[in-house]
Amino acid sequence: MSAGGLLGLVWRIVLVTGAAVLALVACSGSADGVVATDAWARPTPPVGNTAALYVSLKNSSRIDDQIISASAEVCQELELHQTVLTGDVSSMPAVEADAMSIAAGGTLLMEPNGLHLMCLGLPAPLVEGEELTLTLTLAQAGDIEVIVKVQQR
Amino acid sequence: MTVQADPRESADQPDQSDKVRGKPSGLGRWPKILLGAVAAVLLVGLGFRILVGSLNPHLYAGTVFQFDEPAAPLEGIYLADGSEVDLTDYEGELLLVFFGYTFCPDVCPTTLSGAAQAIEGLDADTQERVNLLMVSVDPTRDDPETTNRYAQFFSPQFLGASGDVAAIDRAASLYGIYYDIREPEAADQPDNYLVDHTATLMGITPDGVLRIVWPPDISPDLLRADIAELLS
């Protein structure tokens, strides 16, 4: 068989496999209602005992949902906060209830200098490569466990 | 280069006298014409670059101040080795100044890792001429050693400094920094409190002037371009 024909066959396999994986991912997303699409935290310095966890939540259901509470074993306290830059002054009020809601079909985006989960009272710094478990309690979806990856970004 | 081009030319020359004048071998001419064309293109390109460069000077992402007053001294603010911060130590180099605190969960780590990324992308010579000093706005929890360990986590090149309330108040006021120590998050954990603060990055240029201020959410790429220009 010619090299071109073989390459074509390989491509077909890659494409079919890719489509199957995509279909699976799409299914698992809608089945869970609310899924974490990206969950990460920066490694933290050897001093200070705080961290910010960033989790993006996609609501694939047809009902609006809302974060009721959040907890992680490594955080003495975990609160949803919003960094607000007023001019260049950073303040971090705990957020209003409407900022915690995830509209049906929508995504709640957490990111640096914005909405984040503020973790206070870390017993030890977060180290690159580590993972920590976060439990989010949602009004509709109930408790969901999210693995947060510690990584430099 | 010309030596290499010449042999062919000189090899052609004796023959040329026997041939019809003005109709030399085409092969002998082409390299010259090509060379000329390449040189012309290069010259035009260089001219264009110079022209564009002078018409479009670097547009700073930070806010540039036009006054030439020397930056205010940081009296009573101490480094981890016990010495008072002396801005003249950084003359001839760029000193970035950031006011923050070590229990800062979001904006300080974001700004400091962004600054570290910006500096890492510079060439080695320029990198050596960039310093970053973090001054704490949390005198109760941050002594100079603690602030220094925090700053050095983001880059071994960074330094941390702190002082007593009076010194931090004075430094903050001289640098236009607002800060407000908030009530503890929970009454039974008096050490868990946040500090609202101006989170800009300020640049004291090699002439000792506080010349530029960047917003906290400046991208590493824009910051790097400004730093490179300030030190060019």
Image (cartoon, grey):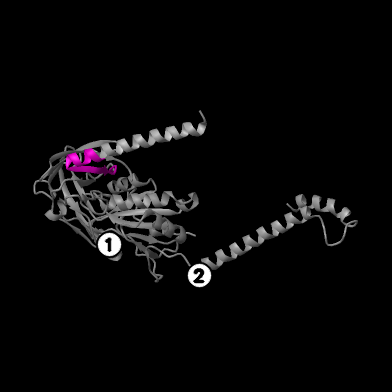
Give how far apart the Cα atoms at labels 2 and 1 are. 31 Å
Q: Can you say whether B3 is above or below A87 in the image?
A: above
Query: What's the magenta region?
Result: A26-44
Q: Is residue B231 left or right of residue A150?
A: right
Which residue is the site of mark 2?
Answer: B55
Quick check: do tags 2 and 1 share a chain?
no
Identify the secondary structure beneath mark 2. helix
x and y percentages locating residue B25 in the rendered image: 81, 55
The one of B93 and A143 positioned closer to us in this rendering? A143
The residue positioned 67% from the left and 60% from the top of the image is: B37
Picture quadrant where residue B214 is located? bottom left
Circles 2 and 1: CB atoms closer than 8 Å: no
Q: Secondary structure at mark 1?
A: loop
- Which residue matches tag 1? A88
Name which residue type carries label 1. Asp
Query: Viewed as shown, does residue B210 lie left or right of A89?
Result: right
**Tag 2: amino acid:** Leu
